Image (tube, rainbow, N blue to C red):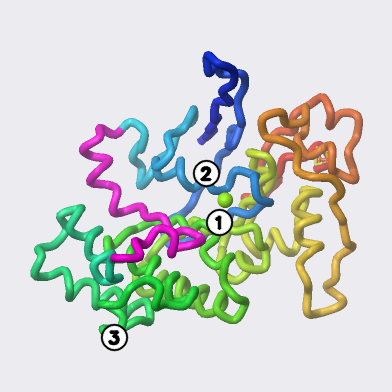
Amino acid sequence: NHLKKYFPIKAGLLNRTVGHVKAVDDISFVIRRGETFGLVGESGSGKSTVGRTVIRITEKTDGEVKFRGVDLYGLPAEDLRKMRPKMQLIFQDPYSSLNPRIRVGDAIGEALLDHGLVSKAEVRDRVLDVLASCGLSSYHIDRFPHEFSGGQRQRIGIARALVLNPDLIIADEPVSALDVSIQAQIINLFRKLQETRGLTYLFISHDLSVVEHLCSRIGVMYLGSMVETASRDELFRNPLHPYTKALLSAVPVPIPKLKRDRIVLTGDIPSPSNPPSGCKFHTRCPFAMEQCKQQVPEFRDVGGNHYVACHLV
Ligand code: SF4
Ligand code: MG
């Protein structure tokens, strides 16, 4: 609810704050239990910061986050610690977060022991269980991270998050570093795990064709703002924001008659420390009007739970 995360920009000998990067600038959305909410946008749009602030790995600047009805930022440290296993993060590159000298079984088991969730005697069985559900086996448990391929490493990353039996998974570009054929396998794994475990996902990606296959709702971010959210079907059939239209027009479609008019965006994404006035997209929007430079468009429901922030709509 009205979530904001501003990072201070420090400068000079006195290290004074001279400005802020508005990484997340007043955004609101709902993820329902058991659904997959896709968050898309170019790099630098604030997606990862949203993912981290909604589970309080990064502290918010303002706004409110509720998890299963509980105000996450109002929780005492001890209660937050108990809640931690229920919200897990999966990264783009699990390899960078795996210690090269620790066997993967131990790396996965460590999290269980840290949270005091099982006794030492039970750890190995729990790790084997979770490896099996991620398509790995006892053959892999005593191996080191460098012995695995990219796709297998992401399976390890997923297993490490799952072993804590979470409800919500924030997956931050989990397939972006993988070959397309491997991407499909990992996406299918995400889907299977959701069905068998009733997981809820916040799935972050710069790639609309990836979220299309997995997400029930999609939010589109631009420069720290949410510009449009809708169900997957509605967003793909009836995109309303010019930025969403531009993103979609770049996605290859197999059926020529569905082909959209190509909207090519010119120019780079502006700096989030000095975003354009009014509608932040006006410097790149092919439909920009005078009003767009002055007035921030309101993010509002245009019917059917379809939200958009654009003066044209
Ligand atoms: Fe384009 Fe104006 Fe709509 Fe922004 S408000 S997306 S500049 S038409
Ligand atoms: Mg990111």
Say whether disc 2 or disc 3 marks the residue closer to the N-terminus: 2
Instruction: Kindly identify which numbered label has been placed on residue 204.
Output: 1
Asked whether, in this view, residue 289 is left or right of residue 218, the answer is: right
Instruction: Provide the residue span drawn in magenta.
Output: 75-101
Q: Establish if 242 lies above or below 234.
A: above
Quadrant in which the C terminus appears? top right
Q: Is residue 302 above or below residue 143?
A: above
Query: Could you say where residue 168 lies in the image, as x and y percent from the top left?
Result: 39, 56
Q: Residues within 10 Å of mark 3 (few under 14, many from 20)?
A: few
Residue indicated by mark 3: 139
Q: Of callouts 3 and 1, which one flags the residue occurring earlier in the amino acid sequence?
A: 3
- Looking at the rendering, the quadrant in which ligand 1 lies is top right
The spot of residue 93 in percent (x, y) is 49, 62
Q: Which residue shows up at 23% across the image and 67% down it? A: 106
- Residue that mark 2 sits on: 50
Where residue 266 appears, x then y in whole percent?
87, 49
Of the pair 151 and 307, the residue shown nearer to us = 151
Residue drawn at point x = 37 percent, y = 71 percent: 145
Quarter location, residue 176: bottom right
Amino acid carrying mark 1 in the image:
Ile
Q: Which residue is rendered at x = 78% and y = 72% of the image? A: 252
Q: Is mark 2 within 8 Å of ligand 2?
A: no
Look at discs 2 and 3 and give the one toward the viewer.
3
Residue type at mark 3: give it. Answer: Tyr
Apparent side of residue 137 relative to residue 251 in the rendered image (left or right):
left
- The reply to whether dot 1 and dot 2 touch (C-beta < 8 Å) is yes
Q: As rendered, which of 147 and 48 lies closer to the eye?
A: 147
Left or right of 292? Residue 201 is left
Which type of secondary structure does the marked residue at label 3 adopt?
helix
